[in-house]
Image: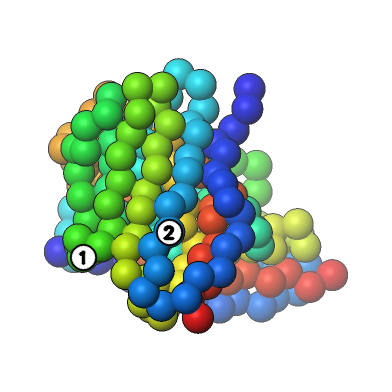
Amino acid sequence: KAGVTQTPRYLIKTRGQQVTLSCSPISGHRSVSWYQQTPGQGLQFLFEYFSETQRNKGNFPGRFSGRQFSNSRSEMNVSTLELGDSALYLCASSLALAGVGELFFGEGSRLTVL
Amino acid sequence: TQLLEQSPQFLSIQEGENLTVYCNSSSVFSSLQWYRQEPGEGPVLLVTVVTGGEVKKLKRLTFQFGDARKDSSLHITAAQPGDTGLYLCAGEGGGTSYGKLTFGQGTILTVHP
């Protein structure tokens, strides 16, 4: 079956702009999590959605937001981009109703902020 | 705040050598997962350990969860160039974690032919 699909794979933005990233989970997976990966901080949890509801949120400023649609597809948005937002943004889907379960990651969206 | 310290950060070895990667924390985790990530790809789950003292083997890879569920190790026997990659340990805090894993900083393993 198809894996987790993230679009776009690469994008370049300038400071102050905003960006929207998309994630299509594996069919049947209702939990979608987002992570930021940087060389300095590693992988850090952003938020998790299940059946269109945000169930968990990491320690990121309010500029980072997300949503999930009825078909389980998810988007995350970063407003007023800063240089430090340059990172690989990873989406993961899971069957887990509680906890974490087995996460299936997409290939990520690599964001460069100039 | 739960933290996971992973060591070593870098490991460069010759084909056929053995190696161990460590993952330590002062916090208790309900489970510990190990992932492998290759350049340009997302992490791929290798194993999940749940019970304190648990040992799991996956071909040449052996994973152990500490008795107190605060630490874990990954041992690779007779490493091969195909084992090259970034190895990540990740801990789950419990039933209300909802998608949240705490990741270690990772170990970049390079196996030379």
Tell me the SS state at disc 2.
strand
Disc nearer the start of the sequence (2/1)? 2
- Residue A50 or residue B97, whichever sits in front: A50
**Mark 1: amino acid:** Pro
Mark 2–mark 1 distance (CA, rounded to whole Å): 15 Å
- How far across and how far down the image is residue A70, in percent? 35, 22
Q: Is residue B42 left or right of residue A42?
A: right
- Residue B28's place in the image compared with A49, above or below, is below
Question: Where is residue A8 drawn, in percent x and y?
Answer: 58, 51
Name the residue beneath numbered marker 2: A19
**What residue do we see at 20% from left, 50% from top?**
A57
> Does label 1 lie on the same chain as label 2?
yes
* Position of the N terminus of chain A by quadrant: top right
In this picture, is B64 found above or below A55?
below
Q: So how many labels did they put on this image?
A: 2
**Pointer 1: what residue?**
A61
Dot 2 falls on which chain?
A
Q: Amino acid at mark 2?
A: Val
A16 relative to A58 in the view: left or right: right
Can you give x and y, in whole percent of width and height, for residue B31 in the image? 30, 43
Q: Quadrant of residue A49?
A: top left
**For residue A98, side relative to residue A77 (left or right):** left
Q: Chain of mark 1?
A: A
Residue lying at 68% horizontally and 71% vertically, measured from the top left: B110
Mark 1 lies on a secondary structure that is: loop
